[in-house]
Amino acid sequence: MAKKHKRLMGFIVIPLIFAFLSYILLFTVLSPMMKPVFSIFQLMSSEKGADFYSLPESIYSPSSISEGTVSLSQIEFPVYGAHYASIQLPGTDEAEDLYFGDSNAVLKKGIGQYMGSFLPGYGSPILLSGHNNTYFHNLKNVKEGDVITITTSYGVYEYKVTGTAIKTRTDKTAYDLNQQKEQLILYTCYPFNALGLTSQRYFVYADKISGPEIVD
Amino acid sequence: MHSSTPKKILAVVCSFLLSLLTFLLLVAICTKMTFFDKGFYLSNIAKTHYYEKVTSDLMEDFTSLGIPGGIPDEVFKNTISQDDVQTEIMACIDTSFSGKTYQIRSNAVKQKLYSAFLDYAKQQHKREATDQEQQALQELASECEKVYIQNVRFPFIQQISGAKALYDRFFIPAAIILGVLCVLLGVAIWFTQRWRHRAIRLYVYAGVGCSLTGILFPLYMLIWAPYKQLNIQPPALHGLLTSMASQYLISLLVVFVVVGLLCTVLAPIYRKLKNKVL
């Protein structure tokens, strides 16, 4: 009986050893090719897996603080595509959603912020874009002296319009993201009712007049 | 040391080599019948509704361009249909598998869209488009062309067809060599064993070993599916490639499970022969 049991185990253990040795041998032979494949795989994959359809959750909850300071640790930094604030243009009844990021998907839903610019309160420029036939269709009516309001989860910011300009889309002098003041720059395609992709952009510039300053 | 011990070790080594070579031969055959077969691509394309998804993604991307360009969705939907997309993709696969390079007919699509834009502009403004408007619409049509290429192109198809040509060149000689080696090892095991039931036992070791080698890796990949975490764009292509990877792994699994099951057929033969000896 013990011998029978031993034979039966042999039919399991020996093939398992064969399988193990096969994997060792294949790994040894194929490892020079496997390393670059693994590197590429790691570069191209994400932990949670590809997710093309779900959007980041909104982190927006309107604040009423319009002065003083707010600590950096109290601010939840938005991820790309997240709705994090609202923006009210002069002459409009409702505020529009403001998103972090300016992809096509974002601009379909609201106004997008260029990721290379700063959040309100940082004391640095903020660059926003929107489509001229949807959320920024009223931008043409904004004039010098008007006030634009951005409400975030950590403060309410007001910006006074200082000027407008029409520039080509490749004009590097249209704005300066390195300047040391908090300037709000809004832009959209120009002319406003044009068909097709035009080469001109309509810019509105506004300087901060109120809102809490972000401190470390 | 008993004089039969080196013989036993040699027999076990032959059994291991038989297991390994059978595994390699079956993987080669499975790969030829899947990744290097046009039918495999077409069946997965049908299974994942690839054409429908590509057309839908394409329209979505066109709409994103249409909004800033002032062109409504209907203009795009009336210009490019799912049949057009299907024809393009099938032509790409057919041409690539016959060893040639396929050029996507994006310029024809661009001209078609541009004409549609001009018609729409004329309809809206009740006049012909001005030079500036024509330039802006040309710009939009060019961007749409890039989007079309991005959605319709079948990445890696040229590399796959190149690999297929190489594989086809070496597959038959390699399969023959592996097959002959397997037969030789089988014969060596049979004639070096005094008792036939021992030879059968060694064949079972080889078969079950080959089966386990071939089952473990595909099973792991199917359960954890790390390939589904690849950020491949567009989404339709991601769905297609993961479906193809899953189907390939399932094919391997089925083949090696069958090999394992066939070995159980040898068990009664082994017992019968052993009883004869006893």
Image (spheres, coloured by chain):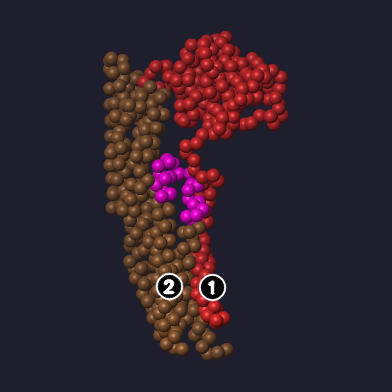
Q: Residue at x 37, y 33 (%)?
A: B59
Residue at the image point whose x is 48% and y is 11% from the top: A141
- Judged from the image, the secondary structure of the residue bearing numbered disc 1 is helix
Against B28, residue A88 (above or below) is: above
Q: State left or right for residue B53 relative to residue A187.
A: left
Q: CA distance from mark 2 to mark 1?
A: 16 Å
Residue type, mark 1 in image: Val
Q: Is residue A62 left or right of residue B96?
A: right
Where residue A212 sits: x, y (%)?
68, 20
- Which residue sits at x=42%, y=45%? B239
Mark 2 belongs to which subunit? B
Q: Residues within 10 Å of mark 1 (few under 14, many from 20)?
A: some
Q: Give the chain letter at badge 1.
A: A
Chain B drawing hue: brown
Can residue B184 be seen in this snapshot? yes
Q: Tag count in the figure?
A: 2
Q: Closest to the observer: B272 or B74?
A: B272
Question: Chain A: what color?
Answer: red
Q: Nearer the viewer, residue B271 or A148?
A: B271
Is residue B145 shown above or below A95? below
Asked if residue B96 lies left or right of residue B251, the reply is left
Quadrant where the N terminus of chain A lies?
A: bottom right
Instruction: Determine if the magenta segment contains residue B222.
Output: yes
Quarter of the figure with residue B79: top left
Dot label at residue A13: 1
Q: Which residues are magenta?
A: B221-243
| Main secondary structure type of the part rendered in magenta | helix
Residue A177: % across, % down: 58, 25
Which of the labelled discs sits on residue B264, or is there none?
A: 2
Q: Is residue A110 magenta?
A: no
Residue A216 image point, x, y percent: 71, 29
Q: Position of residue B105 (x, y in %)?
A: 29, 38
